[in-house]
Image (spheres, rainbow, N blue to C red):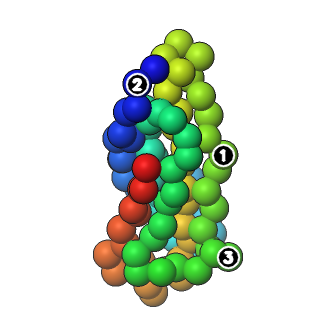
Amino acid sequence: VSPTAPSVFPLTPCTCEDRGSLVTFGCLAKGYFPEPVTVTWSPNIGSSSVRTYPSVQQPSSSLYSLSSQATVPQWLAGKTYTCQVYH
């Protein structure tokens, strides 16, 4: 497999559960090779509020995908957040 840059997609805020005063959103980095990628959030949210899941390799293509989610207080949810993926 030749080196392939990831495609990055936004994941909209979760409304499937009532988290009270918190809002969760994320991004998906899909279709990259080789590992690793590094995900950062801007402005800096803080590591305790970010969860980046381990990458998963698709057996059919050998390409990798991973997702990262951030949780912020609802009063900060109106700000613009950027998920940056470095490969």
Which of pointers 3 and 1 indicates the residue nearer the eye? 1
Q: Residue at horizontal 38%, vertical 33%?
A: 4
Residue 16 versus residue 64: which sits nearer the camera? 64
At label 3, the amino acid type is Ser
**Comparing labels 2 and 1, the label whose residue is closer to the camera:** 2
Q: Secondary structure at mark 2?
A: loop
* Mark 3 Cα shell of 10 Å, populated few (<14), some (14-19), many (≥20): few
Counting residues from the start of the chain, the first of labels 2 and 1 encountered is 2
- Comparing 40 with 33, the one in front is 33
For the residues labelled 3 and 2, say whether their Cβ atoms are less than 8 Å apart.
Answer: no
Disc 3 is placed on an element classified as helix
Type of amino acid under label 2: Ser
Residue at image mark 1: 54
Residue at point 34%, 80% (across, down): 79
The alpha-carbon separation of the residues under discs 3 and 2 comes to: 35 Å
Task: Please give the label number shown on residue 48.
Answer: 3
Indicate the secondary structure of the residue bearing disc 1.
loop
Give the residue at the far bottom of this rendering.
Answer: 75
Residue carrying label 2: 2
21 to 30, vertically: above or below: below
Residue 18 appears in the figure: yes
**At label 1, which amino acid type do we have?**
Pro
- The crowd level at tag 1 (other Cα within 10 Å; few <14, some 14-19, many 20+) is few
Instruction: Give the residue furthest to the top.
Output: 60
In the drawing, what numbered circle is on residue 63?
none
